[in-house]
Amino acid sequence: MAVASTFIHNNLEVMNRNTATKVNPTNSLVNMHITDHGSDWLWAAFSVFLLLTIIHLLLFLYGNFRKPGVKNSLLVIPLFTNAVFSVFYFTYASNLGYAWQAVEFQHAGTGLRQIFYAKFVAWFVGWPAVLALFEIVTSTVLDRIEENPNIFKKFFLIFQTWLVKFIFVEIYVLGLLIGSIIFSTYKFGYFTFAVFFQLLLMVWVGRDLHRSFKSPSHSNIANFFLIFFYLVWILYPVAWGLSEGGNVIQPDSEAVFYGILDLITFGLMPTILIFFAIKGCDEEFFSKLWQYHVKSEAESIHENEKAVAETPSTEAGVVDAEVDNEPQAQV
């Protein structure tokens, strides 16, 4: 705790002398952009992500040194998401990684608005990891095919379920990205695509969540956390509509809105759910998968060796049969 308080205190001192917007000034053509206050908040969010990254890195190294295994490897997921968003919020707070676009609606101001494309890059990279964690926590695919002896079919169905969610979430992010850099009302066409695929994704996750509630081997506490996350998830399109879409709030308010959502989605949720994922992880499944793979290779090699070994004897048998069938000479 002392290390954490010292870390946060040092970052607060850095914020007091924050010169990011002066060192990296916004293009003079841009009318609406983040200020020192917005940058201060973003540095605070960066500090939280960086602290979580360090904590997960230490936990991973400690677990890897003490007892390497699949469960310890799961710590890579929150480590990855927090590391990615540490880099992004460093970029965001430094007033970098942005473009600008003329606003269609003039609620919060007129002229050009600052659009941080780095945010969408971070979402594009981070969302698949979060969905993978959701898949592990619910584990509905493993339960659904538990009686199937084909271990590779289990693995394939897990990957298939995650891949569908991956496609949905990436289209969702791309729709918001493209819509944010379009001036005309056509931006809401891309917004509609994004929301549609977000709803499909929420239905897909909700289906797994519903099945996991029926399984006694799953944690209801983790499931309730996922239900709470639905409320956060719905607020992302709202934030986009108030900022890049409708120009209702200033970029500083946009930074606070997105910052809170990102801290919950990519910082706190992976940190909380990873412990339920580790608790419910079936290491035996992955062991069986590897043993099945090794056994299949060994059997294949054995069959090939057996076929090669039998080939000469078969040919010899054919020759002997031909000799036996030849007519005997008369004496």
Image: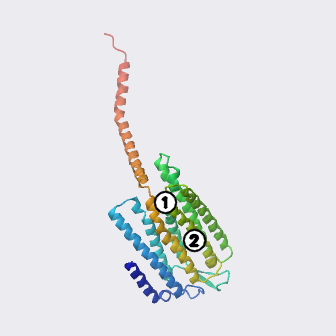
Residue 232 numbered tag: 2
The outermost residue toward the top is 331
Quadrant location of the N terminus in the rendered image: bottom left
Res. 95 in view:
no
Question: Residue beneath label 1, please?
Answer: 136
Tell me: 99 left or right of 16: right
**5 lies left or right of 97:** left
Query: Which of the pair 180/90 is nearer the observer?
Result: 90
In the rendered image, residue 228, in percent from the top left (x then y), is placed at 56, 68
Q: Residue at x 56, y 76 (%)?
A: 258
Query: In the figure, residue 74 lies in which quadrant?
Result: bottom left
Secondary structure under the numbered disc 1 in the rendered image: helix
Marker disc for residue 214: none
Q: Amino acid at mark 1?
A: Ile
Vertical relation: 275 (above or below) 152: below
- Residue that appears at 55% across and 73% down: 120
Residue 310 lies in what quarter of the image? top left
Residue sitting at 36 percent across and 67 percent down? 61
